[in-house]
Amino acid sequence: MNISDIMTRLGVNETAYTKGDLIVETPIDGSEIGRVAIGDAAAIDAKLAAAQEAFLQWRAVPAPRRGELVRLLGEELRAHKDDLGRLAMECGKTLSEGLGEVQEMIDICDFAVGLSRQLYGLTIASERPGHHMRETWHPLGVVGIISAFNFPVAVWSWNAALALVCGNSCVWKPSEKTPLTALAVQALYDRAAAKFGDAPDGLSQIMIGAREAGEQLVDDARVALISATGSTRMGAAVGPRAASRFARSLLELGGNNAAIAAPSADLELSVRAICFSAAGTAGQRCTSLRRLFVHEDIYDSLVPRLKKAYASLPVGDPLEAGSLVGPLIDHAAFDCMHYALDRARAQGGTITGGERIGDKGYYVRPAIVELAAHEGIVCEETFAPILYVMRYGDLDDAIAMQNSVVQGLSSCIFTRDLLEAERFLSATGSDCGIANVNIGPSGAEIGGAFGGEKETGGGRESGSDAWKAYMRRQTQTVNYSPDLPLAQGVKFDV
Ligand code: NAD
C-alpha cells in the first residue's frame, strides 16, 4: 500500500505527514509510515481562539443550513471510503473493518443531516394565565474531542457531525498513535467546507499531540464540552480536571464486556458471535468480549467448538484478503497481554492460544483462558484478545458476576428462552449501557445512544438523543397578558 498515493488522493499535503517529530509506525510490520509535527502550546492556543471565533458565527447559522455542511462531509467520505478505510491500517484494522469504520462515519453524517431539522424542544403548560413556557436547545460552544487509537476516525465523526449541526465548533486531538487518518479526515472536512462556501475558518480543526495537548484542551476555559474517549485512567484524569472549571464532559472509557451462554443458546450462532466479538480487531475494541459465562449444561459442547474455531482464525497482515485478526497496536500492548496471561495462569487458569506469531509487528493467536473463579485479572480490562471463560449454574449468579466489575459498557446473552432474555434486559439484569440478545457485545449501530455506566464514564454519543449533550437547554417563559401573576400564587404587590 502506497501511503503517499492515498494521502495525495485524500488531499493531504506531503509535508503534513513527512516532516515532524512524531514518528508514525504501522503495527502491520513496525515500519515508519510518516512523521508529523506536534503543535506547541501557542499553536494550540491560536486554534482555540479561532474555534471560539468560529463558534460565535456558526451558532447564528440556521441548523438545516449547518446540516448541509455535514451532508457535504458525508459525500466526501463516500467518495473516499476506500482510501480512508485502507488508511485505518495505521491502527492495524482489517480492510473490512477499516471500511466499516468509514461507513459508520457516513452513517452518522446522514443521521446528523436529518437531525439538523429535528433539534426539537418542548412546549410546556404554564400554571399562570396568559403565559406559555418552552424549552429550547441552543448551541453550546467549542467542543474538544479527544480520541483513542482503536477507532481513529469514527469516534471523531460521532462527535463532530452532531456538534456541527448543533451549532458548535470542534477542536480534535486524535490519538498520537493514529495521526495520519486524522490528517486525512481534516483534509476531507476542508474540501467539504470549501464546497459549502461560507463556513467560518477554524470551525473544525485538529491538533496533533499527546497527553499534554489533551490537558491543554481540557483546561482551556473556551472549551465548553470535553468529549474524551480512551482508557479509564485517562477519564479519571480528564473528568475531575474539566469539572474543576465546571466544563461539561462526555466520557467514553474502558469496558470489560461479558456474554452469558444459556442452556438454550444456538451454539453455532454463539460461537460465531463470540469469535467476532472476542478475537475481532485483535480484542482492541472498547466493546470487545472479555468474559464469557457458560452454563454448565452446555460447557462441554460450546467450549471445545470455540477452541476449534479459535485455532483456525486467520491471523496476519490485515490488508491481505482472508485475514480476520490483525496485529496488536504496539509492543506495550503485547506486554500487557502477557502480563494478564501470567496472572491468569497464577490464578489457576488453563490457557489455549496467546502465543506470538512471527517476529514482525505484534501478532498473537487469540487466547481462551478457562477459570474456576471470577476474580483478579478477570475483573480488569486488558486491551488484547483474551477471553476468560467460566461456568455458571444459575442465571442470577451469572448476571451478578457480570455486573460485579467496575466497568459497565456492553453485555449480551445467548438464549432462546424468552424469560431469560427479558430477565437479562430488565432493571435487575445487565447494568451496562449496552445489552444485547443473541448477538455479541461489539459492533454497535449509530442509531442508538452509545456508551456505558460506572467507570466506563456514563457518556452517550452517536444516535438517539445523544445530541442533547452538545447543546445548552434554555427554559423560556413568555407572558402575553397585561397582568403579572407569580408562580405558586406568591403575592408581591407594589
Ligand atoms: P488512552 O487513554 O491511552 O488515550 C486516549 C486519548 O487520550 C489519546 O488521545 C491520549 O493522548 C489522550 N490522553 C491520555 N491521557 C490524557 C490526559 N491525562 N489528559 C488528556 N488527554 C489524555 O487510550 P488508548 O490506548 O488510545 O485506547 C484504548 C482505551 O480506550 C481502552 O481502554 C478502550 O476501552 C477505550 N475506548 C473506549 C471507547 C468507548 O467508547 N467507551 C472507545 C474506544 C476506546
Image: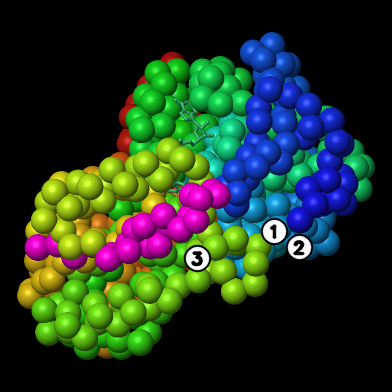
Quarter of the rendering containing residue 488 = top left
Q: Are marks 1 and 2 in contact (CB under 8 Å)?
A: yes
- For label 3, count other residues whose C-alpha is less than 10 Å away and answer few (under 14), some (14-19) or many (20+): many
Query: Where the N terminus falls, by quadrant?
Result: bottom right
Magenta residue span: 352-372
Disc 2 CB within 8 Å of nearest ligand 1 atom: no
As drawn, the label of residue 82 is 2
Q: Is 12 located above or below residue 275 in the figure?
A: above
Query: Where the C terminus falls, by quadrant?
Result: top left
Q: CA distance from mark 1 to mark 2?
A: 5 Å
- For label 1, count other residues whose C-alpha is less than 10 Å away and answer few (under 14), some (14-19) or many (20+): many
- Marks counted in the figure total 3
Tell me which amino acid carries mark 1. Answer: Gly
Tell me which amino acid carries mark 3. Answer: Val
Q: Position of residue 105 (x, y in %)?
A: 66, 57
Q: CA distance from mark 2 to mark 3?
A: 22 Å
Point out the tag, 2 or 3, that comes first from the N-terminus: 2
As drawn, the label of residue 283 is none
Residue shown at the point (51%, 46%) measured from the top left: 329
- Left or right of 41 in this view: 184: right
SS for dot 3: loop
Viewer can see residue 213:
yes
Q: Nearer the viewer, residue 11 or 117?
A: 11
Q: Position of residue 149 (x, y in %)?
A: 54, 43
As drawn, the label of residue 315 is 3
SS for dot 1: helix
Q: Position of residue 162 (x, y in %)?
A: 63, 48
Q: Is 478 located above or below residue 115 in the figure?
A: above
Q: Position of residue 80 (x, y in %)?
A: 80, 58
Residue shown at the point (30%, 88%) measured from the top left: 266
As drawn, the label of residue 85 is 1
SS for dot 2: helix
